[in-house]
Image: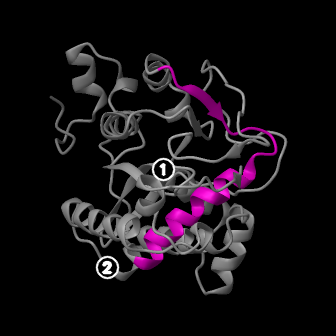
Amino acid sequence: MIDRNHELSVSRPARVLGISRGSVYYLPQPASTADLALMRRIDELHLDYPFAGSRMLQGLLNAEGHEVGRLHVRTLMRKMGIEAIYRRPNTSKPAPGHKAYPYLLKNLAITRPNQVWAMDISYIPRARGFVYLCAVIDWFSRRVLSWKLSITLETAFCIEAVEEALSRHGKPEIFNTDQGSQFTSVDFIKLLKAAEISISLDGKGAWRDNVFVERLWRSIKYEEVYLHAYKSVPEVRAGIDRYLAFYNNRRPHSSLDRKTPDQVYFNQPQPISLAA
């Protein structure tokens, strides 16, 4: 409707059309090559030092020869959807107006599949861009029950992943996430309530649960993502699909007595007590 390349300013056609100049925004620009390289390195550093905030990450980057300020590091972290993991008075805050739910896993013995599911979102770099990966995980077996990719951090792809997990595997007794806006949104909470699932949100002192999910992201990235320069979203999807089939079916886990997640999830003759 408005040609931004025309010799007239944007303000004049906006007045002619009777719309507010403030409602006419610039088209979003893709991240620069330099920023993509920084985001890739920030992602690697975050996996190695999940407690590092923007100040520490800036210092680590500067020591490696990257000239970047703390504010820019913080901006890129927000774009990537990551933050430092450490114990603090208020962990991830829900969006304004979103209801907070209690943390239900403290001192809970998790002894069987489908007792507790967890969900989180991670940044996935590509050769020229990035996407976001969300995954639903069975806490007891470490099995990835479903996953979805998205080019934005909107709630819809998280809901799709949960719906797929529910349709394939029944439902858990408890569903645990952090207090990110995707997981405290009205639509997401409505889905869990409709399935009569108890909702648990990480809160004060529950930082260990984020560390647990970080192990999955670390495995995916170091054993798959960082080994490939994905050129397109379909390539990312194919790579993640290939790796998670290996992760669930063939990759033994030391925390599961060298069994695979599939072996523990589908065939568990004797409960193994795992403290939350």
Q: What colouring method underlies this structural image?
A: one colour
Disc 2 to disc 1: CB gap under 8 Å: no
At label 1, the amino acid type is Ile
- Quadrant assignment, res 32: bottom left
Q: Which mark is residue 204?
A: none
Residue at point 67%, 70% (across, down): 57
Q: Tell me, yes or no, if residue 240 can be seen here.
A: yes
Instruction: Give the residue pinned by disc 1.
Output: 137
Give the alpha-carbon distance from disc 2 to disc 1, as whole Å.
Answer: 24 Å
Expressed as whole percent of the image width and height from the top left, the position of residue 155 reads 41, 34
Q: Considering only vertical position in the picture, is 211 above or below 28?
A: below
Expressed as whole percent of the image width and height from the top left, the position of residue 102 reads 72, 28
The quadrant of the image that shows the N terminus is top left
Q: Tell me, yes or no, if residue 150 can be seen here.
A: no
Residue at point 50%, 49% (across, down): 138
Residue at point 40%, 60% (across, down): 262
Badge 2 crowding class, 10 Å Cα cut-off, few under 14, some 14 to 19, many 20 or more, is: some
Total numbered badges shown on the rendered structure: 2
In front: 260, or 227?
260
Look at the image and give the residue range highlighted in magenta: 196-223
At label 2, the amino acid type is His
Main SS, magenta region, reads: helix
Side of 276 relative to 183 (left or right): right
In front: 220, or 39?
220
Instruction: Give the residue pinned by disc 2.
Output: 228
Q: Secondary structure at mark 1?
A: strand
Expressed as whole percent of the image width and height from the top left, the position of residue 237 reads 25, 60
Check if residue 213 falls in the magenta segment. yes
In front: 268, or 150?
268
Check if residue 133 falls in the magenta segment. no
| Mark 2 or mark 1, earlier in chain | 1
